[in-house]
């Protein structure tokens, strides 16, 4: 059932809009506390993974970063099934109804999957027509001196105006129900390695009863 006390994380209010350039290590992000992602099934995670969240008047900003020695995906088109390979994922409900939520995914090729989900008992309905209109995101692979990958990241700016259930941009101390995920596929094959902020403890991320709360903090 529901978590007794959902975990909380913070989106930090910025003093100015953030320029999305793909660098998740720039000064603005260095001041923001990372939200760690752990193994979704309770195992020892292979790689360190985090996300950071910030906001300004018009956008929510996310920076994902994950260690990885083999960064890959074959998907390049919008709304391809990115979740079958390597991705970062953001699930969110901008109100108190976690059974109706949005899902945005980013892969290392800069492809995006976005949609709306409704849960009805055991049934899950996907509306893939919904689009995070005006979102800007840049994925980046970080390499060692010998050229081998050591991590990948994604920086995104999500316009509040693209979220049709949101009547106005958040106010300070507003809370959304959210979860953050990562899928890694070390052998280019199943089983996938699953990472979560608030673990669902099964091989399924679509468990909104495990969503935590993201608090929109002031400066």
Image (tube, helix red, strand yellow):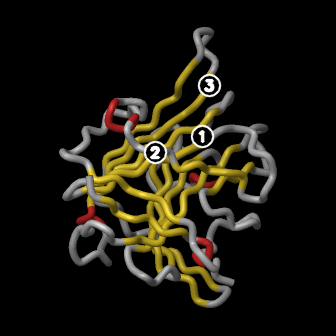
Coordinates of residue 121 in the picture (x, y in percent): 64, 90
Which mark, residue 17? none
Q: Residues within 10 Å of mark 2 (few under 14, many from 20)?
A: some
Query: Would you name the residue on which mark 2 appears?
Result: 33
Q: Is residue 39 above or below residue 114?
A: above
What is the spatial separation of the Cα atoms under label 3 and label 2, in whole angstroms? Answer: 21 Å
Q: Earlier in the sequence, mark 3 or mark 2?
A: 2
Q: Against 122, is 137 above or below? A: above
Which comes sooner in the sequence, label 2 or label 1? 2
Q: Position of residue 24 (x, y in %)?
A: 42, 35
Residue at image location 27% in from the left, 58% down from the top: 218
Residue 74, labelled with which disc? 1
Quarter of the figure with residue 196: bottom right
Q: Residue at image x 53%, y 50%? A: 35
Quadrant that contains the N terminus: bottom right
- The span from disc 2 to disc 1 (Cα, nearest Å) is 32 Å
Q: Secondary structure at mark 2?
A: loop
Closer to us: 48 or 148: 48
Left or right for 186, reference 195: right
């Amino acid at each position: 059932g529901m978590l007794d006390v959902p975990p909380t994380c913070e989106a930090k209010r910025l003093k100015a809009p953030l320029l999305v350039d793909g660098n998740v290590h720039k000064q603005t992000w260095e001041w923001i506390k990372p939200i760690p992602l752990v193994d979704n099934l309770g195992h020892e995670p292979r790689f360190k993974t985090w996300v950071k969240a910030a906001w300004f008047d018009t956008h929510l900003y996310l920076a994902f970063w994950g260690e990885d020695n083999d960064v890959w995906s074959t998907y390049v088109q919008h709304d391809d099934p990115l979740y079958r390979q390597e991705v970062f994922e953001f699930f969110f409900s901008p109100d108190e109804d976690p059974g109706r939520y949005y899902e945005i995914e980013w892969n290392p090729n800069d492809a995006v999957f976005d949609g709306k989900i409704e849960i009805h008992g055991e049934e899950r309905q996907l509306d893939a027509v919904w689009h995070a209109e005006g979102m800007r995101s840049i994925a980046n692979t970080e390499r060692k001196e010998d050229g081998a990958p050591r991590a990948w990241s994604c920086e995104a700016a999500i316009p509040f105006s693209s979220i049709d259930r949101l009547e106005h941009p958040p106010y300070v101390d507003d809370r959304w129900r959210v979860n953050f995920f990562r899928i890694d596929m070390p052998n280019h094959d199943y089983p996938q390695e699953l990472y979560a902020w608030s673990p669902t403890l099964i091989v399924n991320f679509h468990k909104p009863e495990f969503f935590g709360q993201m608090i929109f903090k002031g400066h």
